[in-house]
Amino acid sequence: MLMTNEMAIGNMQKPTEYALVGDGVDDYLNTNYGNGIDLNVDDITVEIEIEFLNVGTTGDIQDIYWGEVGTGDNNRIYLGIYEGYFSLGIANLLHTNNKSNKAVQINKNYLIKIDFNNSGYDLYINEDLVMQNSYTPFITSANFYLLNANGTGVRSNAQIFSYRVILNNTVVQSLDMNEGSGANVKDYVGSNDATIVGATWQEVD
C-alpha cells in the first residue's frame, strides 16, 4: 500500500523539546551579556518565556531576572516574585514598594516583557501592561542573570523556555533553551552563549 502524505506526516516523530529548570535553591543562568549597556541613552527590551513550578507568598523576593552595578539595592535591576506577585525593582524603586497587582500562578506559561528607556520602564505579562514607572537611570554596564545572580538570595523554582534582548530595535541576544544537554545555552544571533550554573535540562511536552 502506498503511503499518503497525510499518513507520512502522522507517522513522523515530533522533535523533542526541552526547557532549562532551576531548583529554586542555588541554580541560575549567567547570560554573559549586558556589559556596555547604558540605560541613560539606550532603549532595551527583555523577553522571558517561563513557567513557575513553585511560588512563595511571603519572605524575600524570588528572583527571575537580575543585573547589578556595584552593591546595594539602588544599583540593581531585579524582576521577581514578591508575596506571590510580580515585582520589579530598579534604581531607587525597591521591589518591596513596587509590587504589581498581577499574581503568579504555578504551571502556567508566561511571556514576560520589560521595556526600559532613559526615563522609565513598562512591564508586560502575556501582553498585558501590569506596571509602568519612572526612575533615574544608573546602569552603564552590567551582567544579567536569570533565576538570580551568583550571590546570595532566593531563586525561582521555574523552567525557562526562551530569553531575548533587543537593544535599540536590534536583537542582540537570543537564547532558545532547547539544546537538551551541555553546560551552555547557545546565542543564536551573536557570540554571547549563556553559562548554566546548577540548572538542568528537562524534556517538556
Image (tube, rainbow, N blue to C red):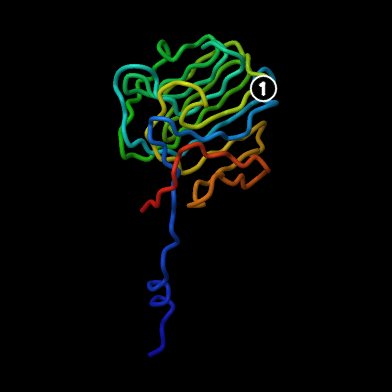
From the viewer's side, name the closer residue of 56 and 108.
56
From the viewer's side, name the closer residue of 152 and 54.
152
**Where residue 135 sits: x, y (%)?**
56, 12
Q: Residue at x 70, y 26 (%)?
A: 36
Please identify the quarter of the rendering in which residue 58 is found. top left
Q: Residue at x 35, y 25 (%)?
A: 102
From the viewer's side, name the closer residue of 77 and 69.
69
**Where residue 23 sits: x, y (%)?**
38, 35
In the image, residue 3 above or below residue 135:
below
**Where residue 2 sits: x, y (%)?**
41, 88
Quadrant including the N terminus: bottom left
Q: Residue at x 55, y 17 (%)?
A: 76
Instruction: Say whether residue 193 is left or right of residue 61.
Output: right
Q: Residue at x 48, y 52 (%)?
A: 180
In the image, residue 197 above or below residue 137:
below
Q: Among all residues in the image, which is located at the extreme bottom? A: 1
The number of numbered badges drawn on the structure is 1
Q: Secondary structure at mark 1?
A: loop
Circle 1 sits on which residue?
141
**Where residue 51 sits: x, y (%)?**
38, 38
Instruction: Say whether residue 165 is left or right of residue 42.
Output: left
Q: Judge the density around disc 1: few (<14), some (14-19), many (≥20) Cα neighbours within 10 Å.
A: some
From the viewer's side, name the closer residue of 23 and 1.
23
